[in-house]
Amino acid sequence: MRALSSLILMLSLLWLVPSGCSKQEEASEQAISQAKERLYAGYALDQPGSIDVGVQPLSMPESPVTELLARDNTLAAQLKARNLVLKPFPFYKGKEIYQLMLQGKLEAGVLGDMPALSAAASGDIVIAAMVKHGFSSIVGGKPMLVKDLKGKRIATGLGSTAHFTLLKALENEGLTEGDVEVVGMEVDDMPQALAQGRIDAFSAWEPTPTMALAAHPEFRLLHRGLNYGFLCFRRDFVTSHPAEARYIVAAVARGCLWMRQPGSLDQVAQWVKASSSRFQGTPSFLTPEQTVAITRNDLLNVPDAPQIPMRLLQERELLWTEFEYLKKNEKIPQKIPWEKVRNSFDTDLLQGVLTDSKPYDLRRFDYRYDHVQGGTK
């Protein structure tokens, strides 16, 4: 995995060659895509006795939650008693995770709101817990207003929550996607591309904006848009393994409780840095202090997290607006009603665990502390 991850990063250095040649950019993107496919092809998914979970080590604050899932000895013991083991598999994008969920190769995954909505519209999933209540940000290379982006090159993850944030910001200024040049790009490539002048701005989720603004004082925050992250299961897994689904949801709640204890989040930040560095094949530029700040702001300081607020599921709220956007842009079929997506959210699963918490040992904080083999492999 490390070799293939390094290959992805090495290929991204092709951007350092003086640009202006779109064919060169396309060739680089294709090479990166092929390297990722080879990386994922090495994953032994859907093995007997395993609960395979897709995670995103480069997304915040989801990565601290999934890092604790991987290290939770209480969860491991509960699953072992049922002859099962939880196996986290790292991915770069939520779309890659939910596609494998719909193919039956992953039992669960941590997804941003747009991928979660797409998965709920396209398949049969259960959205059980909220693991992010944060922001996507538009970052410019110099001081400007959103309206000044007209005619500019803006990088984003196509079809992502950050893409939606960009479009809504443009719409607020009377602009459309056609008024700018949208460039599809991996989030970890965006700060370098902006610094080199190959793009004029980017729209991305955390931690990319935080790292970019800290490393480049000349960059400016132009706009922020609210977004969410969720723990999702395949519905057939919840139906066939209801106890195991509750144990995993309980582990998410337990992790949030533990990270609120003095000093615990500092330890998690060290684990996250190590895991993201292993996944990338190069040291992570996200500092533990930045991890702590993002996790607090976007998860731990959110009232009732990781419970899903019922108001989010109402029409005219953000999730419904994103759902309508996906339909309008033919990302999901027009015939899919909001009720199908709305019914994918199961607020009772976590609430039942919290109400009857004793069987789930919510305050039995027992995490694996090894640094080499622990966490997301």
Image: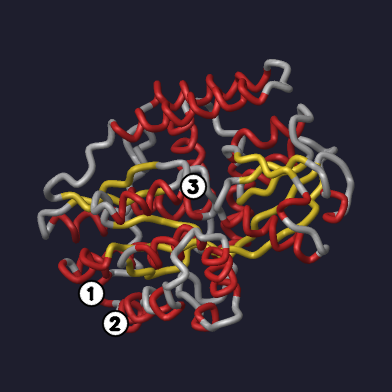
Amino acid tagged 2:
Asp
Q: Which residue is mark 2?
A: 356
Q: Residue at x 15, y 54 (%)?
A: 84
Amino acid tagged 3:
Gln
Q: Residue at x 63, y 45 (%)?
A: 156
Q: Which residue is mark 1?
A: 359
Q: Residue at x 61, y 19 (%)?
A: 14
Task: Name the mark on residue 267.
Answer: 3
Q: Residue 67: image x %, image y %?
A: 41, 49
Name the secondary structure under disc 1.
helix
Q: CA distance from mark 3 to mark 2?
A: 29 Å
What is the quadrant of the C terminus in the image?
top left
Say whether residue 289 is left or right of residue 143: left
Label 2 environment density (alpha carbons within 10 Å; few <14, some 14–19, many ≥20):
few
Say whether residue 235 is left or right of residue 281: left
Say whether residue 78 is left or right of residue 148: left
Does residue 45 lie above or below 237 as drawn?
above
Q: Determine which quarter of the picture holds residue 256.
A: bottom left
Q: Residue 167: image x %, image y %?
A: 69, 58
Label 3 environment density (alpha carbons within 10 Å; few <14, some 14–19, many ≥20):
few
Amino acid tagged 1:
Pro
